[in-house]
Amino acid sequence: MLDWINLISAWAVPVMIAFIPLYAYFKKVPVYESFVDGAKDGFSTAIGIIPHLVGMMVAISVFRASGALDFFVGWMAPLLSWLRVPPEVMPLGFLRPLTGTGSLAFTTDLIKTYGPDSMIGRIASTIQGSTDTTLYVLTVYFGAVGIRNGRYALKVGLFSDVVGFIAAIAVCLLLFG
Amino acid sequence: MVNKIWLALIIIGFLFAAVKGDIGVVTQAAFDGAATGVTVCFGLISVLVFWLGIMRLAEDSGLVKTISRMLGPIVGYLFPDVPKNHPAMGYILSNMSANLLGLGNAATPMGIRAMQSLQELNPDKQTASPAMCTLLALNTASITLIPTTLIAIRINFHSANPAEIVGSTLLATAIATLAAIVADRWYRKRNTYRTPPQATAPPNISLKG
């Protein structure tokens, strides 16, 4: 099963790169010109995201570097150890929705320190793998089309992060505990 | 809510740095953050240019429409206000499959393309439509069959069983996605009752009840 999924993952992109132009060619589309025409939008879309992403990254960076993040994590620690949650993984709960690179670095560090097969290593891997960086996804996806008012989207994203975080810990404690 | 979170992150960071007597850190962090934002966007350029080119081929050849028609009903119930044969469905499906397979490089451009397509249906260009919120919810929770990056890291640190987290991740991500869908549904219902969208409802008709 796992091998099959890996195989599909490895083949998916190459097949798309070859099949889509070939299919288009048989449908009498001028393949190269059409590709270039579509690709043109890529640059302006990426550039359009810059202000959104810079704004968000600045806020997150200031929050982290000032030590505020560490403070809140330390403040939560007693509650967590009472809930049988290893306090070491707690920062991930805050980091994961905010920064993808930050939480990946933190996860890597936990795996390095406690070992990949420790409970902490397994929980960290599961948390990191099970959700995406909500603020980043929101900023990039809405920024790309110029949406200013995201309505309830952020609340939904953060709510699913909290649920995912708790679920990851619970599943690991049940599965590996 | 974004406004409040954004401001809170900056002000709380500022206060912490001030209390610790290390105010210089704010300046440094702000410009580091800005640099990261630009670097990430520059990294997106190549990926977006390439995939939007390929997506245009898929669009011009009618492939996107075919996918929408064939697989649209599967996700149709999640996006009730998107017409069944609309190309947006095709993009949403390709975004979801790319996420599922863990193809991050392809998932983001396809998601952006889906957003652009949904934007065409959106009466108010500055405010997210319910369909956009649902697409975002699916992407923030991001169901992934194989967390490839994590498995690679675990191999790096000599795990006895690098792939043992596949099951736990799948279970956790399924629960998170389910929570996202339920929450999205709940907000969507609540919002249509409370604030009828101006573009579709004449102001003198109440949508309550």
Image: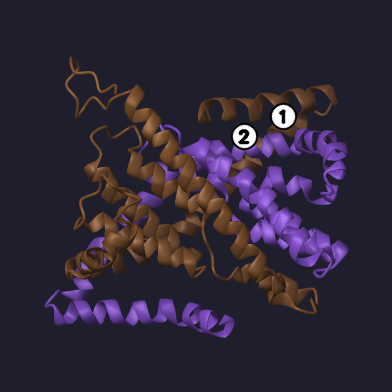
Chain colours: A purple, B brown
Q: Name the residue under label 2.
A: A59
Asked whether the viewer can see residue A145, the reply is: no
For residue A1, side relative to residue A106 (left or right): left
Mark 1 neighbour class, 10 Å CA radius: few under 14, some 14 to 19, many 20 or more: many
Q: Residue at x 22, y 43 (%)?
A: B121
SS category of the residue bearing label 1: helix
Asked whether the viewer can see residue B109, the reply is: yes
The x and y percentages for residue B129 are 32, 38
Q: Which chain carries label 2?
A: A
The answer to which quarter of the image holds residue A65 is top right
Q: Residue B13 carries which label?
A: 1
Kind of residue indicated by mark 2 = Ala
Nearer to the camera, B76 or A72: B76
The answer to which quarter of the image holds residue A18 is bottom left
Q: In which quarter of the image is the N terminus of chain A?
A: bottom right
For residue A132, side relative to residue B89 (left or right): right
The x and y percentages for residue B85 are 19, 58
The x and y percentages for residue B35 are 59, 46
Q: Residue B60 carries which label?
A: none
Q: Mark 1 lies on which chain?
A: B
Q: Which residue is drawn at 76% across and 61% down?
A: A174
* Identity of the residue furthest to the front in this view: B209
For residue A142, side relative to residue B56 (left or right): right
Kind of residue indicated by mark 1 = Gly
Q: Which residue is drawn at 41% across and 41% down?
A: B185
The image shows a total of numbered marks equal to 2
Label 2 with label 1: CB-CB less than 8 Å: yes
